Image (cartoon, rainbow, N blue to C red):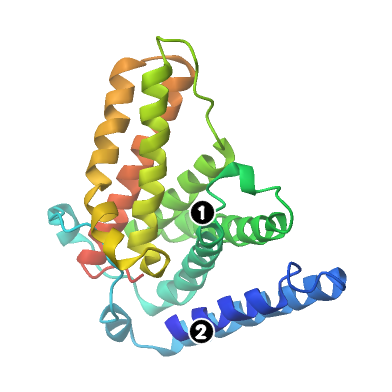
Amino acid sequence: MGELSGIFRNLVKKYHPDKVQDYPEWAHQRMTEINEAYELLARKITESVPQNHRQSQPKAESDDAIYDNGPLSRVTPFGSDVSGVFYPAFNTFLDGLGLYYQYGLENPAYRQEGVRRFRYREAMRLIISGRDTLIEYKSRFGHPVVDAASRYARLTVADIDLGTVPVSMDPRYYKYDKRMMKARKAFDESVKVIFFPEFIPNHLRSRYSSGLYSCYSEFIFYLTVFDKGERQKLGILQTARYDALITLIQLRNAELLVF
């Protein structure tokens, strides 16, 4: 699956409308065919690989902290009937998220900048497609792994849609808004380390992964300062993102989820 994803990303770079600007309609058609082929092959690979083999694949890097997997000890791995449809949807979401981070689109200023708008459009198509399918499977299967993945995908889209939160010049808010802005950025860097370590230079990976809990502390601190209004909603969203990410890490550590 990792090799297929690598091939997919290389094809995206080669045939993306950014690279074939003289023939945009042709490029969009090629991108559609590439995505359809990827989804078909990913489904076939997932269905053909035994569950225990998938669980033994190398894991992405994460925080060195020990996460409490106790509550997950009662969760049973899902069968091939569920994993065969879950992983294509989950990987579609991750492929979109990888494209999103690869081109720095967590910075909203880049999303309409020149050719990056095409990358943003394609990333969001994959992210939303994966999210919607995961939400559908959540109601169909009701398995904790599917529930956790759909929750993380839903919260990720909510944060992307939020964009940049303006930093108020009002002395009552300025320092807190700045701290929240920095914590959101640091959290995105931690997400890259966990899912896409190849995007982060080796010497910075430990810094970002170890800073994950610091982000959570900042989110909670923000909530203690603002207990109503839009700032409270922002704090709740960021805290929920952290909680959803930690749940995915716990499921991976318990060998119930592979990424």
Amino acid, disc 2: Leu
Mark 1 lies on a secondary structure that is helix
Check the picture and name the quadrant holding the N terminus: bottom left
Residue positioned 36% across, 46% down in the render: 187
Residue 78's quadrant in the figure?
A: bottom left
Task: Out of 4 and 128, give the one closest to the viewer.
Answer: 4
Q: Which residue is mark 2?
A: 4
The span from disc 2 to disc 1 (Cα, nearest Å) is 25 Å
Compared to residue 257, the image places residue 4 above or below, namely below
Residue 69's quadrant in the figure?
A: bottom left
Residue positioned 36% across, 70% down in the render: 259
Task: Out of 167 and 136, give the one closest to the viewer.
Answer: 167
Residue 1 shows in this picture: no
Query: Relative to 231, is 186 on the left or the right?
Result: left
Task: Out of 251 and 228, give the one closest to the viewer.
Answer: 228
**Residue found at the very far bottom of the displayed protein:** 48
Residue 159 shows in this picture: yes
List x then y, in percent, for residue 179: 36, 29
Compared to residue 125, the image places residue 49 above or below, namely below
List x then y, in percent, for residue 138: 45, 56
10 Å crowding of disc 2: few (<14), some (14-19), many (20+) = few
Residue positioned 32% across, 23% down in the render: 223
Residue 49's quadrant in the figure?
A: bottom left
Task: Out of 166 and 40, give the one closest to the viewer.
Answer: 166
10 Å crowding of disc 1: few (<14), some (14-19), many (20+) = some
Mark 2 lies on a secondary structure that is helix
